[in-house]
Amino acid sequence: MSEREQYVVGVDYGTLSGRAVVVRVADGAEVGTAVCDYPHAVLESRLPSGRALPPEWALQVPEDYREVLRTAVPEALADAGVDPADVVGIATDFTACTMVPCLADGTPLVEAGYADRPHAYVKLWKHHAAQPQADRINRLAEERGEAWLPRYGGLISSEWEFAKGLQLFEEDRELYDLMDHWVEAADWIVWQLSGEYVRNACTAGYKGIYQDGRYPGRDYLEALSPGFGSFVEEKVAHRIGQLGERAGRLSAEAAAWTGLPAGIAVAVGNVDAHVTAPAAQAVRPGQMVAIMGTSTCHVMSADVLREVPGMCGVVDGGIIAGSWGYEAGQSGVGDIFGWYVANGVPAWCAEAAGAAGETVHEHLTRLATRQAVGEHGLVALDWHSGNRSVLVDHELSGLLIGQTLATRPEDIYRALLEATAFGTRVIVETFRESGVPVEEFIVAGGLARNPLLMQIYADVTRLPLSVIDSEQGPALGSAIHAAVAAGCYPDVPSAAKSMGKVRAAVYVPDEARAQAYDRLFAIYLELHDQFGRHSTTMRTLKALRRAAVTSREA
């Protein structure tokens, strides 16, 4: 009698929805999947109560995350048609840095009677209202010569734990004092599943400034803001679990939510981008993985430690145990394309797309594909959501130059596609110049379905472009970690070899187009340095906007 197949569940928490996938342990076959949209999506203008939010805020409701467990996991099991008794583990990944202010038992402050207080909510990764705090964190760290700063390319992002925590401390001290734990959502959801609060090594290192076994010191934090010196010891520090380890076992309550057996392994949490690398079998040095969706996160492992300007971080074991894990990123990619289609495309273009049986994205892509490189005469800066790497400045904004009365919608669309590729090239070249080789570019995420975009990236970067052979890379990556946590494989690389999937060199660079892009890239770099390093124009415009909004709502 043959042994029964074993399965694991991976749950990927994205910006707008959560996706569960049931995966066979033996070969990584994805046998069932389901998606749950967050009922409250992203709160960017108002709280559910109607209270207005200032510019640059992005909040979420934690109950939406539990709804994914109650809805998507059982539906994925039903879709798979497997016996829940054959599931041996579950793992989750999350956007980051997404922060949940909690009481001692893990109750979010928004569920503790503070639903009309913005700072009680989850601060989503793209909450950029803490830029003033990030600026001060960076200035003081540079002045003091803090040893951890070069590990983050010389700049800490407003998206990360300390900037958002300082904003809470300074803007709502009552809630800050009430909060017992400042928790990454990646760890909070594991807490909900297992009853165990374990900080994962990935977010602790990349988003929580945890380097060489310690966080920034009390004296630095106190100098940053009087009273903030105890932030680490009182709100942040906790047991850290390594990637692929078991954080705990599925509680009876979570078993009732999910339909899974109580007591199965619950893996240590992870970040949606970093967890995807094993799913694409990218566990060797030189392989850069770009998880391309609303934003892009670039991750890769290396056997050398280098200081890369503007990187999001380098963490020992941050992706694969025994290797240095590097992260960089672009704050807006798919979001930019979506914004343009929603706000910048004339009605006649949408009507033409409908008449052709296409979405507007498909229509503009088809038209843009006909163009030669440079034919539209445009260059854009892809900073509509700020710049994550290598400038690390969310006060920057988008720019389009070269428009004339002959410019058409597909021209602008292609220029925006190209701008994001140029932004990636800046990142790749910065890594190489810093002594971290990049030899292969692997794409995961929904944007991999756009062949024009993929070819542009191959041509602009002059790299062979491989594509993960899964529609849900992060969820598959989580499933791989679940299999390791359950003891089915000895380590993540071994599990990735059996369960990961990738199509190698699907797109290769064309030298003629690459040379044409070199000329456009030179203009992009000129604009990049002028507006990103020298001019204060974009910061001034952001300040004027905030002042006008505040004045109007006063």
Image (cartoon, helix red, strand yellow):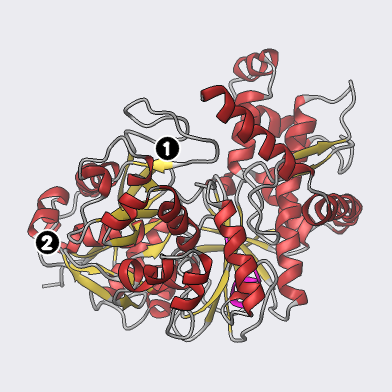
**Residue 307: x %, y % from top left:** 66, 79
Residue 333 locus on image (x, y percent)? 62, 45
Coordinates of residue 127 in the picture (x, y in percent):
50, 46
| Quadrant in the rendering for residue 351 | top right
**Rendered residue at 80%/37% (across/down):** 400
Mark 1–mark 2 distance (CA, rounded to whole Å): 29 Å
Q: Magenta stretch?
A: 150-157
Which residue is found at the position 59% from the left and 79% from the top?
146
Name which residue type carries label 1. Val
Question: Label 2 is placed on what type of residue?
Answer: Ser
On screen, 408 above or below 253?
above
Q: Is residue 312 above or below residue 552?
A: below
Q: Nearer the viewer, residue 187 or 293?
A: 187
Q: Which residue is mark 1?
A: 42
Residue at point 29%, 68% (across, down): 482
Q: Nearer the viewer, residue 223 or 206?
A: 223
Give the number of the disc on residue 251. Answer: 2
> Is residue 119 something that shows in the picture?
yes
Q: Please give the count of numbered marks on the rendered protein.
A: 2
Residue 311 within the magenta-colored segment of the rendering = no
Say whether residue 287 is visible: no
Image position of 137 (left or right of 233): right
Q: Is label 2 in a helix, a strand or a loop?
A: loop
